[in-house]
């Protein structure tokens, strides 16, 4: 999503004051903030149903793809919030999958 769909979302008349080519850097920075927060929270809020996070990532992809095509979101700040949410989901999938696999005590070695 972050490498293919989001860069296609442009705000040429944005009042933010950043050049268009620099907005992508902010997209990446905000995404990484979300990933950092979610990867740091597995001990507080472990998630066992990883498919739900994948489902919400699919919803994000469809929504952001629609935004890139039709350009109907009025502000870059809305996209920033969605990208933060995307980072939270992506980091949560990664860290919770690792957490579930590392804590799987039902797998026994057969010698």
Image (cartoon, grey):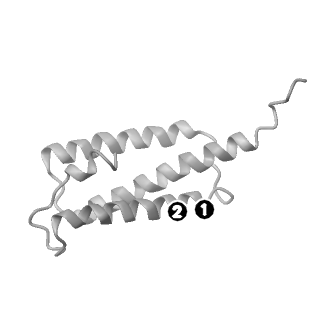
Query: At 56% from the left edge and 47% from the top edge, which residue is drawn?
Result: 94
Spot occupied by residue 26 in the image (x, y as percentages of width and height)? 31, 66
Which part of the image, by quadrant, shows the C terminus? top right
Q: Mark 1 touching mark 2, by CB under 8 A?
A: yes
Residue 24: image location, x then y, percent: 27, 60
Q: Which residue corresponds to mark 2?
A: 36
Q: Nearer the viewer, residue 84 or 26?
A: 26
Q: Residues within 10 Å of mark 2 (few under 14, many from 20)?
A: some
Q: How many marks?
A: 2
Look at the image and tell me in which quarter the N terminus lies. top left
Q: Residue furthest right?
A: 111
Q: Is residue 30 left or right of residue 35?
A: left
Q: CA distance from mark 1 to mark 2?
A: 6 Å
**Residue annotated with mark 1:** 40
* Residue furthest front in the image: 111
- Disc 1: CA contacts within 10 A as few (<14), some (14-19) or many (>=20): some
**Residue at the image position 41 percent from the left and 56 percent from the top:** 85
Whole-percent x, y for residue 78 in the image: 27, 61
Residue 79 location, quadrant: bottom left
Residue furthest out toward the top: 111
Looking at the picture, does residue 58 appear above or below residue 64?
Answer: above
Q: In the image, 22: left or right of 93? A: left
Is residue 15 rendered to the left or right of residue 78? left
Q: Nearer the viewer, residue 1 or 46?
A: 1
Front position in the image: 55 or 102: 102
Where in the figure is residue 18, as x and y percent of width and height? 19, 72
Q: Residue at x 13, y 45 (%)?
A: 70
Q: Can residue 47 be seen at all in this image of the molecule?
A: no
Do we see residue 98 in this rendering?
A: yes
Q: Quadrant of residue 17?
A: bottom left
Label 2 SS: helix
Mark 1: which secondary structure?
loop
């Amino acid at each position: 999503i972050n490498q293919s769909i989001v860069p296609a979302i442009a705000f040429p008349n944005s009042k933010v004051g950043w050049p268009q080519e620099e907005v992508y850097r902010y997209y990446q920075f905000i995404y990484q903030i979300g990933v950092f927060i979610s990867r740091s929270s597995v001990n507080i809020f472990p998630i066992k149903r990883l498919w739900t996070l994948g489902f919400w990532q699919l919803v994000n992809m469809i929504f952001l793809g629609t935004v890139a095509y039709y350009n109907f979101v009025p502000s870059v700040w809305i996209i920033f919030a969605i990208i933060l949410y995307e980072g939270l989901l992506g980091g949560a999938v990664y860290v919770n999958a690792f957490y579930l696999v590392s804590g799987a005590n039902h797998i026994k070695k057969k010698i």
